[in-house]
Image (tube, rainbow, N blue to C red):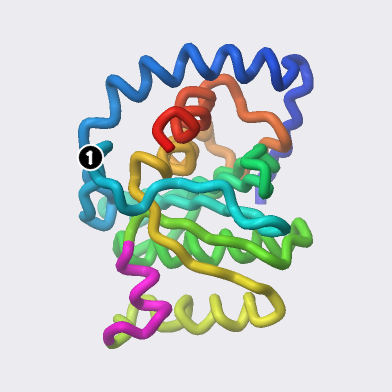
Amino acid sequence: MNSIICEEKRESWAQIWEAGVHLADDFAAANCKGETTNAGTTAGTSNSAGRWQIPETWYMKVNIDATFNATTNYGAVGLIGRNDKGELWGAQYTRITHVGSPLLAECLAMREGIEFAWKHKWRRIILEVDSKLPIQVLNEKFRVPEEVTTIAEDIPFLSRHMDVKFQYVSLVFNNAAHTVAHWDHGGSMEFLWLHQPPLWLLPAFFMIYHLS
């Protein structure tokens, strides 16, 4: 797997925050009018449900989103990990292949979030996704579709030694993960940014603090 790890150290958090504040205002005004997620749910600033909140003490929050291309059966996972102060720990882009549906892409994203947390020694996590369907599948609210049976079994197994909470969040508040999932990856299968977001992610990353 072609994996790239990037630590951007040139800008301080104060500089990043100042730049993000200016960019977020314009971004929020232009993009928060209501959108449709890949799984078909609608979100907008008028929707009070699914707002982003700083995680509980000692918990890490992992926001995830997935893309799906029905022509190529390829997709991507965008992931944002924040600590209990709301600070960025890491952002990750992962390309996924042999994806047959938006639901499978979302479930693969949830599994990716669990694996990411375990790899980085997080044992208490809140996993947020902007589609309610994969959460309902994991909670066995209805019969699990055959296409995601294996993934639905993998996730409880992978998280058996962890404290994991699954939550729905509106797309407006999941836009950082959404942006990473749609990043122009340039052919990389996986790309990880540690501790500081890249400049192109700043508007989406800081927008939640303006809207929450």
| Secondary structure beneath label 1 | loop
Asked whether the viewer can see residue 72, the reply is no
Of the pair 190 and 33, the residue shown nearer to us: 33
Q: Residue 173: x percent and y percent?
A: 40, 42
Please identify the quarter of the rendering in which residue 70 is found: bottom left
Q: Is 91 left or right of 136, judged from the image as shown?
A: right
Which residue is at 61% across, 65% downward? Answer: 114
Q: Amino acid at mark 1?
A: Ser
Residue 44's place in the image compared with 50, above or below, is above
Q: Is 18 left or right of 57, judged from the image as shown?
A: left
Asked whether the viewer can see residue 46, the reply is yes
Q: Is 48 left or right of 42, judged from the image as shown?
A: right
Q: Quadrant of the C terminus?
A: top left
Of the pair 209 and 36, the residue shown nearer to us: 209
Please identify the quarter of the rendering in which residue 87 is found: top right
Q: Residue 143: x percent and y percent?
A: 28, 87
Which residue is at 37% across, 67% downward? Answer: 104
Residue 81's place in the image compared with 200, above or below, is below
171 drawn magenta: no
Q: Residues within 10 Å of mark 1 (few under 14, many from 20)?
A: few
Q: Main secondary structure of the magenta part?
A: helix
Q: Residue 34: x percent and y percent?
A: 21, 37
Q: Which residues are magenta?
A: 132-142
Which residue is at 61% across, 45% downward? Answer: 190
For disc 1, the marked residue is 46
Residue 190's place in the image compared with 118, above or below, is above
Q: Is 171 left or right of 125, judged from the image as shown?
A: left
137 drawn magenta: yes
